[in-house]
Amino acid sequence: MDRLTLEEAKRLNATMVSEDHLIIHALNVSYAMGALAEHFGEDKEHWMAVGMLHDYDYEKYPEEHLAHTAKPLRAAGVPEEDIRAILSHGWGICTDVEPLTNMEKSLYAADELTGIIQACARMRPNGIKDLEVKSFMKKFKDKHFAAKCNRELILKGAEMLGMEVQELAAICIEGMRPHAEELGIAGTAQ
């Protein structure tokens, strides 16, 4: 395979990931990555495919995350650059693969960021449909809100991309917004 397609990424992900919250997380990151690809003038579907597969081994090996990713993806024919991008999102946590390309840096930043966006949207009557960056930033600054989402990684990722967190969040929110129903963040207001 010379290029990972979104269809192939979804197929591969489904062989390892069955928990709803992890499927939603993969979709969140995929849609955010698509928006970031557009921002950087890159191949949207390709970036979405990498985002879809980023937590490939997490459900089965949470304590050894990313240690069981490269070999099976390589065997499935996933290109080395895509495997490297996936491994780089664990930089400094569970891998020593530093994010160098815009795709790698985007994945590193979007992984945790989409968790906070999702948590914000879940609390709102209209979900993500009217979520503004200002509201997101209030929750971002509250360390107790979505406490498991690592803000240091988000800040570091934004810095690597030469962006403010606000700009990064705006792009990711826009990428996720059209998929509100599928992501379960369309809100409760009828």
Image (cartoon, helix red, strand yellow):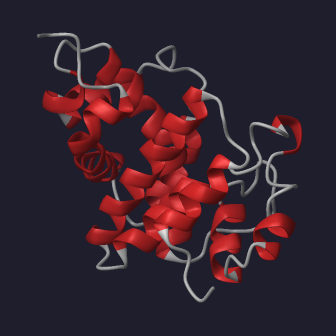
> For this rendering, which residue is in front, 103 or 178?
178
Q: Nearer the viewer, residue 73 or 80?
A: 73
Q: Nearer the viewer, residue 2 or 119?
A: 2
Q: Position of residue 134 (x, y in %)?
A: 20, 31
Quarter of the view holding residue 53: bottom right
Q: In the image, is residue 42 above or below residue 54?
A: below
User: In the image, is residue 52 above or below residue 176?
Assistant: below
Q: In the figure, residue 69 lies in which quadrant?
A: bottom right
Q: Residue at x 82, y 74 (%)?
A: 75
Q: Position of residue 127 (x, y in %)?
A: 23, 22
Quadrant assignment, res 59: top right
Number of numbered discs on residues? 0
The reply, left or right, for residue 13 in relation to residue 179 is: right
* Residue at the (70%, 73%) spot, across then down: 84
**Coordinates of residue 168 in the picture (x, y in percent):** 33, 52
Q: Quadrant of the N terminus?
A: bottom right
Q: Quadrant of the C terminus?
A: top left
Q: Position of residue 29 (x, y in %)?
A: 47, 48
